[in-house]
Image (cartoon, rainbow, N blue to C red):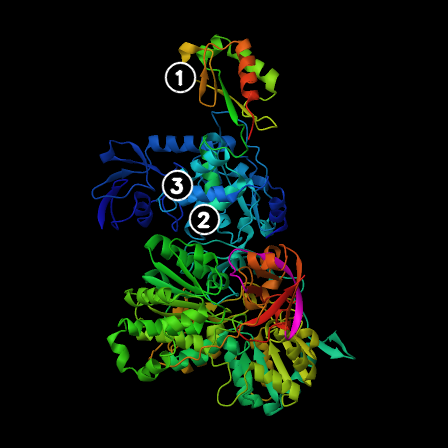
Amino acid sequence: MSDVAAQQVEEQEPEVDLAKADVVIDKYIDLPGNLMPVLQGIQDTYGYVPRKVADYVAERLNVYPSQIYGVLTFYAQFHLKPRGRFIIRVCVGTACHVQGAQRIKETFYNLLHIKHTETSADLRYTFEEVACLGACGMAPLAMVNDDTYGKMTVQKVDEIVAKYSAIPLD
Amino acid sequence: MVNLTINDKQVTAPKDCTIYEAAKLNGIKIPILCHDKKLKPFGACRMCLVEVEQMKGRQIPSCTTPATEGMIIRTDTPEIIKARKLVLELLLLNHPLDCPVCDKGGDCDLQNLTYDYQVDSNRFVDSKFQHEIDYNNPLIERDMNRCVLCGKCVRICDEIVAFGALTFIDRGIETKIGCDFEKPLDCEFCGSCVSVCPVGALLARPFKHKARFWALTNHNSVCGYCGTGCNLTLGVKDNKVLTTVYNENQGFHKGQLCVRGRFGYQFINSENRLTTPLIRKNGRLTEATWDEALEIVATRLKGGNSVAALATPRLANEELTLFKKMMLDNIGSKNFDNSAGYAHAALTEGFVRSFGSAASSASILDIQKSDLLLVVKTDTYETHPVIGFEINMGVKNKGIKLNILSDKRGKLSKLPGANTQVHIPGAEVAVLNALCNSIIDQKLADDSAVSLPGYPELVKALAGFTPETVAATSGITAESINKLAADYASAEKALILFPTGLGYAGHTADLATAVANLAILTGKFGKEGCGVLCLSEKNNSQGAVDMGFYPREGGMNALQILDACTSGTVKTLLVAGENPLTSYPDNAKVKAALDAVEFLIVSDLFLTETAELADIVLPACSFAEKEGTYTSTDRRVQYVKPAINKIGKSKSDFEIISSLIAKMGGTPPVTPAVQFAEISANTPGYESMTYATLGNEGAFAPVSINPVFVVPVAAQITAAQGKLALVTGSVLYHNGTLSQHGEGPVHVCPDAYVEMSRADAISSSINDNDLVTVSSSSGSLQLKAKVSLRIPEGVVFIPYHFPAAPVNKIWSGSAVTMVSLSK
């Protein structure tokens, strides 16, 4: 291995438990074309696709690590960095924009100090601006994981943040 | 065949070809950036658009559309030209126009097409890419700003090299090519990606800013490293070999090379080359004239049987035969050998006994024609990478089954469907015997086998090698042995491959007879896609055997010669191109022999460790500076012309030996061609060959086969408590000790290492890159540790090429040496 590669190995992410990856891989190991379901399962398990796990999947499925990286970067659904326990999505599409989405967005930022695609240091929140959530009648709209909050107001932002900040992280 | 009309011209083309290929076959040029004839069609660049009347005049990519009967195709309508100009405009929008400093200038497909289509302005405006350039390795520079995303590098690394270093990252306008997690390139550096890159995105760094492409003179040659016999084009300027030039039409491998072939040429013009003869005066090697040196050598050589010679199988056939003639006729000694003797015993003893010929009964071309490959040791990839590419293509494109018997896993084990059976080191012959036993037991033997000589003896000897008994000692289950046997026997065509060489002491005559038994038992020899291919280590190992440059009729072999040096029977030792001190087993013994011998003469390109001990050193020249023929592992005889003039005052071994013969009163041949005429007259299989008939492609020397069953002796392995089994061998980037002078191989793999399993590393608390002492009964050696997944527990691997860490200090030539590790 060249020195450069050795250096690369050193700057590693936190330890991950590969046994959890085994559970996912074992489930799909005999399925032809199993890369996508495995990677989706890995993401569900870890919340993102850690580099070490990606390498491990490459080894177990006998797929080039590069090929896995190609797939991971092609699809928007995969994330390579740890994500928050709660994913806040604020719609900034046309209808929401007209209804003041900008204020909603700014209020979230003032409370959490994270911008688009950023994750809070405690891994509680990830913030995303999205173009449309498909419920323009409820504009302005926000979602936290699978919960939908319509007709958003600045005050509601406070309530949402208070609600989710009270849930203990495991 | 299908009939087509291309640009109003009636043409025909094979049924399974694309429109692009049909046009090319008929001399009609369609511009393209993403096509390489070795790769599958991709359709990325949209330059090859054509119009097909049956498809309502739509513009379709010719490289992905099959040619069908009656197609009426136009390749150059004004609409198509307009579309191609648009494609070029869009490519040039982001591509930097830094052609004056780009090494690809003059050889760049994009530059040439821009010129052809006169794209002198651009209707669009956009910023250039701002990708960081990857300068992290010494061999391949990756400048993704120049990339046109043709994907050839990604595809060749997967489809042919099977390394898969590169991929498309991200999508849409952001797409770029890179490695996983955008790390710097860290691969086997075969440079295949560089060779197919249509632009200057991937460049060979050793050649960077050395010369413009058009200033090079191209010389066809044959690679001087391993026995595969790959064809090379050397790019020469000012008497220097500056690069290897890719030519997709060259050789069976279609221009495909490994790291040694592509990046290992620098030894030719190395600053460390010997340029003048050296004579030891007052204990120091001092410069001398040729006349002076040759005079002394010729006097010393008049010693009859007290003179012995060791020659490298890198010498040309002409040199080896002349050398042999000098030894026999002018000196009167039968004591000469090439390599360490055992390194070619598989051929000279094993195959001679089993097949009646000291040559492989199959060719490299059989690999892709076979149905099943049985590879002994995954090292086949490391020793002969281009043969590894052939195996990969066969497995991936033709569904050839791949079974591997090995003491460790390797790159071959990763090929799709590869079945690797890992056995305890040294158990190869026992396992092969068990396979024969199982074939007979399962009644899968060929009918012809029973009547062949040696059959009853073999059956009797195999009784002790039932799958069950061998399973207990080899680590492979009886079930797997039976399955391997049934697979091999029931395949219609099957081919066995195994590497030989200085690092493979276990690949002996017995291994050769054991695999030969398997092939003979099932009738899998002498047919297309069948046989046994013994992969020879050096570029002319097979030639050295064909020329008879090894001891017969009472001569001493290499190891005996060294013993005789110590005992004083051999007084003068002539070493041509060998470096026994690094590569022969048992360093202490070799050192004692070289110290003891009265007079040591070494001819070499470099002042090797062996040459440093010599009384006279003669500067020899490389394959690029001389004329001669080389015989590849599958007996393809290839003719090589000099590409450059000789460096300094160096001479070819042919000239050196000719001068010595003349000084001893003999009459040397005038030219290598005259010597080759003698070779073709006297060497079976070489009849009717001349330099002219060999041409660029070379010619195969046929092998005659007389099959006989021979009982191979299986090695007894005695495991020692708490010790690890040391196996030696080659590492991918190196070949012999010559590659130590190739910039590429040395940059990628600079030092020796000891490779071990994770379990053994943990139990000895050793981490990657720790300095570890490896001790055997004959000595100890300090090496960097490399922890890997491919090595089974209880086994360590050390490559043998490195003079700074000679494995022969702890290895005395046995197939398996028991060692212990300490930190």
Q: State the extent of the magenta-drawn residues as a range.
A: B777-794
Q: Tag 3: residue type?
A: Pro
Say if B147 sits above or below B575 in the image.
above
Do circles 3 and 2 both sit on a common chain? no
Label 2 neighbour load within 10 Å: few <14, some 14-19, many 20+: few
Task: Give the letter of the chain under mark 2.
Answer: A
In-front residue for pair B411/B433: B433
Q: Which mark is residue B398?
A: none
| Secondary structure under the numbered disc 1 in the rendered image | loop
Q: Nearer the viewer, mark 3 or mark 2?
A: 2
Mark 3–mark 2 CB contact (< 8 Å): no
For this orientation, the residue located farthest to the right is B282
Residue B531, image x, y percentages: 35, 70
Residue named by callout 2: A60
Do circles 2 and 1 both sit on a common chain? yes
Mark 2–mark 1 CB contact (< 8 Å): no
Is residue B115 within the magenta segment? Answer: no
Residue named by callout 1: A134
Q: Tag 2: residue type?
A: Arg
Residue named by callout 3: B31
| Secondary structure under the numbered disc 3 in the rendered image | loop
Residue A75, image x, y percentages: 44, 32
